[in-house]
């Protein structure tokens, strides 16, 4: 999608206040599994880190809502069953993002529920590597990597409320596989969270150097 686009500075792939925020994304809203399908999926799942322990069932949805902290529109992904409710980009399975910028930043809200996201990258050996972060895995920081040949899982620690999650993809690829990062091909975000913006950058930018539209303006508490 962006392979032949000049890439420098910032490249946004989602902004909740944009004219068509989900233009690049496909969404899926799946029903919570029945007790039978739960037992079958748990017995057949090769990677138990994919699915968290069960939560109290809620009606799943992917909808725009007005956040009570930001007082503006954000995307809410909500479900008690992560694998069936998510957004992913590109929207077509046959396409790839082709984004070469190495830093990926999520502005997301911790809803006090389970959350998982996955980033698929290409390295200089021509191999696709997946990096999956979730807040139900054992570990304290995202530096605790569990490396397998084609997927690396890592715990995601979030503060209450809104968070800025920064991923140095080049560093993760080098540490996990000893190879060089080439490009990001796909991003998938599973329930449950609220999202303001997702963007790439060519360097880690301090808060005071960010463009105004890339900042989170949280109310000042007295």
Image (cartoon, rainbow, N blue to C red):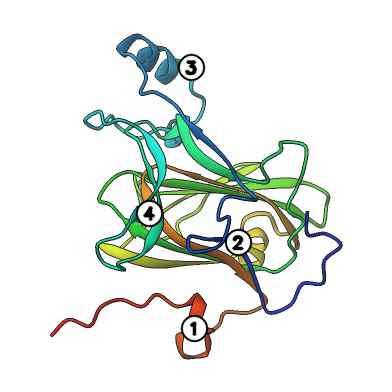
- Alpha-carbon neighbours of circle 1 within 10 Å: few (<14), some, or many (≥20)? few
Where is residue 1? Give x, y as percent. 78, 53
Q: Secondary structure at mark 4?
A: strand
Q: Are marks 2 and 1 in contact (CB under 8 Å)?
A: no
Inter-mark Cα distance, 2 to 3: 29 Å
Dot in front, 4 or 3 = 4
Whether 79 is drawn above or below 15: the answer is above
Q: Secondary structure at mark 3?
A: helix
Where is residue 151? Give x, y as percent. 60, 43
Inter-mark Cα distance, 2 to 1: 28 Å
Q: Which residue is mark 4?
A: 194
Q: Which residue is mark 3?
A: 44
Inter-mark Cα distance, 3 to 1: 47 Å
Give me the disc on residue 212: 1
Give me the disc on residue 172: 2
- Residue 108 falls in which quadrant of the image? bottom left
Give me the disc on residue 186: none
Closer to us: 160 or 39? 160
Dot in front, 3 or 1 = 1
Inter-mark Cα distance, 4 to 2: 25 Å
User: Of marks 2 and 1, which one's residue comes earlier in the chain?
Assistant: 2
Inter-mark Cα distance, 4 to 1: 20 Å
Instruction: Tell me what residue is drawn at x 71 percent, y 36 percent.
Output: 93
């Amino acid at each position: 999608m962006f392979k032949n686009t000049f890439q420098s500075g910032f490249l946004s792939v989602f902004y909740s206040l944009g004219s068509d925020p989900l233009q690049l994304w496909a969404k899926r809203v799946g029903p919570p599994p029945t007790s039978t399908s739960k037992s079958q999926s748990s017995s057949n799942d090769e990677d138990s880190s994919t699915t968290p322990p069960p939560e109290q069932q809620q009606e799943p949805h992917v909808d725009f809502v007005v956040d009570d902290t930001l007082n503006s529109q954000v995307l809410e992904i909500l479900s008690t069953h992560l694998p069936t409710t998510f957004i992913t980009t590109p929207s077509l399975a046959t396409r790839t993002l082709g984004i070469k910028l190495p830093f990926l930043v999520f502005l997301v809200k911790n809803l006090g529920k389970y959350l998982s996201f996955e980033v698929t990258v290409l390295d200089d050996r021509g191999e696709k590597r997946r990096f999956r972060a979730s807040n139900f895995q054992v570990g304290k920081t995202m530096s605790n990597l569990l490396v397998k040949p084609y997927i690396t899982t890592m715990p995601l620690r979030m503060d209450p409320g809104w968070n800025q999650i920064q991923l140095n993809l080049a560093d993760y690829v080098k540490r996990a596989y000893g190879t060089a990062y080439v490009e990001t091909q796909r991003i998938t975000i599973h329930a449950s969270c609220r999202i303001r913006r997702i963007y790439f950058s060519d360097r880690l930018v301090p808060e005071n150097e960010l463009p105004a539209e890339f900042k989170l303006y949280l109310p000042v508490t007295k």
